[in-house]
Amino acid sequence: MSYPESIYKNGNGDEPIIYAQGRLVFVLSKQFNYGSIEEALNDSKIERIGIADDRMAPYGMAASQYLSEIGIKERLKSQLVQGESIGQINQYIITNAVDAAFTSYSFKVKNETAYNYFEVDPVYFNPINQGAMILNHGKKYNAEAANQLLKFFSNEKCKGILTYFGYLTK
């Protein structure tokens, strides 16, 4: 939400709305069988852990907060393989460039049986809010379509799709 909020604060669009909340998961190769995330993170067999850039990527920020909150981020520093985005982290997982990674729940939906997963408890990180807004340009040149798109995010069909892909909706 930081990007839409900065656009709004700069006067370049309407106030953003939150239409969904992302969920963070820890993904591991099927070769590993652990009972918890913490067990995996404390095992020396896990040598490379993918994490999105915590300065820009919301899922990277959440994963970094989680590791800090449980007190092991500094210890894992040499094992963390940073990707630019969650998309890049997903490529690291698929190509086996990492042994484990923090990613979005939607990755699990698309790759349900290929990996082992643990959902990260959201008490350890700030919400991963997904936002939408109407930009001034949209209001000026196609207000009706922009309003319809924004309205779409609150309808039940859209919420069903988002829920299917692992997002939380209200």
Image: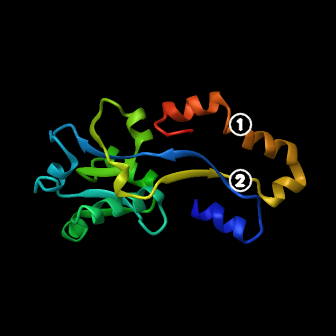
Report x, y in % for residue 98: 26, 53
Decide which of 113, 60 is in the foreground and name it.
Answer: 60
Query: Quick one: SS at disc 1?
Result: helix
Q: In the shown orientation, is residue 140 left or right of residue 99?
A: right
Report x, y in % for residue 124: 34, 56
Q: Quadrant of the N terminus?
A: bottom right
Report x, y in % for residue 6: 65, 68
Q: How many marks?
A: 2
Residue linked to disc 1: 152
Please name the amino acid that badge 2 sits on: Met
Query: Quick one: SS at disc 2?
Result: loop
10 Å neighbourhood of mark 1: few (<14), some, or many (≥20)? some
Q: Quadrant of residue 33?
A: top left
| Residue 142 in view | yes
Decide which of 42, 5 is in the foreground and name it.
Answer: 5
Q: Residue at 74% of width from left, 39% of height from top? A: 151
Please tell me the numbered disc located at residue 133.
2
Q: In the shown orientation, is residue 76 left or right of residue 11?
A: left
Q: Residue at 16% of width from left, 53% of height from top? A: 46
Please name the amino acid that badge 1 sits on: Phe
Q: Choose the circle earlier in sequence order: 1 or 2.
A: 2
Please tell me the numbered disc located at residue 165.
none
10 Å neighbourhood of mark 2: few (<14), some, or many (≥20)? many
Q: Quadrant of residue 11?
A: bottom right
The residue at the far left in this view is 44
Q: Residue at 89% of width from left, 53% of height from top? A: 141
Q: Quadrant of the C terminus?
A: top right
Decide which of 23, 95 is in the foreground and name it.
Answer: 23
Q: In the shown orientation, is residue 7 left or right of residue 91?
A: right
Report x, y in % for residue 166: 46, 37
How far apart, in angstroms, are the residues tagged by discs 1 and 2?
12 Å
